[in-house]
Amino acid sequence: MADYSGRKALIIGMARSGLAAARLLDRLGAKLAITDMKSESELAEIIEKLPKDAGRFFGGHDGVSLDNYDLAVISPGVPYDAPFTKAVRKAGIELISEVELAFTQLDSPVIAVTGSNGKSTTTSLIGAILKSAGFSVYVGGNIGAPLAEAVGENYDWIVAEISSFQLETTKTFRPKIGLLLNITPDHLDRHKDMETYTSLKARLFQNQGEGDVLIVNADDKRSAFIKPEPGAQALYFSEKPLTGAGAWLEEGKAVARVENKMFELFSAGQLRIKGRHNAQNALAASLAALTAGVEPEKISEAVIKFAGLAHRMELVDEIGGIKYYNDSKSTNVDATVKSLSGFNKNVALIAGGADKGSGFGGLAQAVAQNAKGVALIGQTAPAIFNELGEFEPKVITKGMKDAVRLASGWLKPGGSVLLSPGCASFDMFKNFEDRGDAFKAEVAGLKEESKRCR
């Protein structure tokens, strides 16, 4: 384990991972300082939980003297190429993520999940399978609970969602089992191009070796080219039958081949999580669980029971025969396209939000094939409107309330309203959860109105 005693550490960014990193480094004997662009009043709740003797620089980084530090831990929300972060690197200060810091102190084996879409669902599903099989499990990383909070505890497995932002500054991070679900255009406002973004995703596997396992989506062209490091084993998952080791769908049934043994798992029709993409997520999670030593029967039971996560194809309600799905976590076009693929024409889509620089190519075809109409919200509404071309009806609305009501009006009983924005949320909302909650509130309001009209 790395020794941080006496290290002079600067924490850059005071969200949950920054706080967890600060508290861990304090326990390990480092000398601490914290800096954030937000003011002291904005960070009041977090400041209460900080080590009392830590240096504090809030409202900017102007008071920070880089000569005083030999280690910096960067929060995922702080860009690697921000001016201050560049200055930190130029000063020769070791720059790592909270994930890297935590990994240097962990005793438990790690299952790590990355990809553009499906990370949270797959991470949670793996955790649910392992727990149902009797393993002690910590589920965290980008999904919510920082990995640093797992240090000092004994777990059979740590299951971690890992983002490209966290992978930018990993060095020794080495998952025993690593999953790459897919690579589609995302976060290009930060990573600039697909080559950079793809290389960051591949960093998840760069330190793997003897005894480690790489699980990859064989149907995703950008993911499938990534090969295991010497000594590591590659397993693949696909919607089509495979000739090698992996898991796939065969006539709607999930089967797997691992170490030359065949296993029957579940039927896609049994899944409570909706959509083809979630069938792929279930295949990936099943492969990870098999590799971790879970019996096939336990995997099948847990996968079938899994109801999914909030804001990810979440069935909110049914009003007058119309179902309302909250898929606010779909923050890029590929995620929205996959979500739409689970419906057959009688669905009204609510899309739009903050621009991530990825464009909207591919959305028009998916909308034409599957959507009854499109209600647009947010900053990108005009751009999406133009991208959809001659498709009708498509309307730029004033906001979530108008969008929900307009979408509902296009449908007959048996139809669905789908919030799947394909964009970030920060133009109108605090985060994707806030956006999903706004959708659910409007659906609840619509239900009350329908009761009064009876």
Image (cartoon, rainbow, N blue to C red):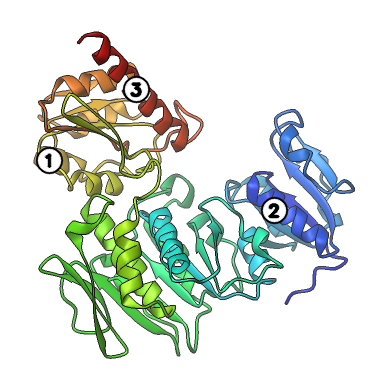
Percent position of residue 142, x then y = 53, 54
* Quadrant where the N terminus is found in the figure: bottom right
Residue 98 located left or right of residue 167: right
Packing grade of label 1 (10 A; few <14, some 14-19, many >=20) is some
**CA distance for labels 3 and 2:** 36 Å
Residue kind at label 3, given as amino acid type: Ala
Residue toward you, 56 or 438:
438
Label 1 element class: helix
Residue kind at label 2, given as amino acid type: Ala
Residue toward you, 312 or 9:
312
Residue that numbered label 2 is attached to: 20
Residue 4 located left or right of residue 357: right
Residue that numbered label 3 is attached to: 444
Residue that numbered label 1 is attached to: 370
Q: Tell me which numbered mark, 3 or 1, is placed earlier along the sequence.
A: 1
Residue toward you, 283 or 43:
283
Percent position of residue 42, x then y = 70, 30
**CA distance for labels 3 and 1:** 26 Å
Q: What residue is drawn where x is 34% and y is 43%?
A: 330
Q: Quadrant of residue 94?
A: bottom right
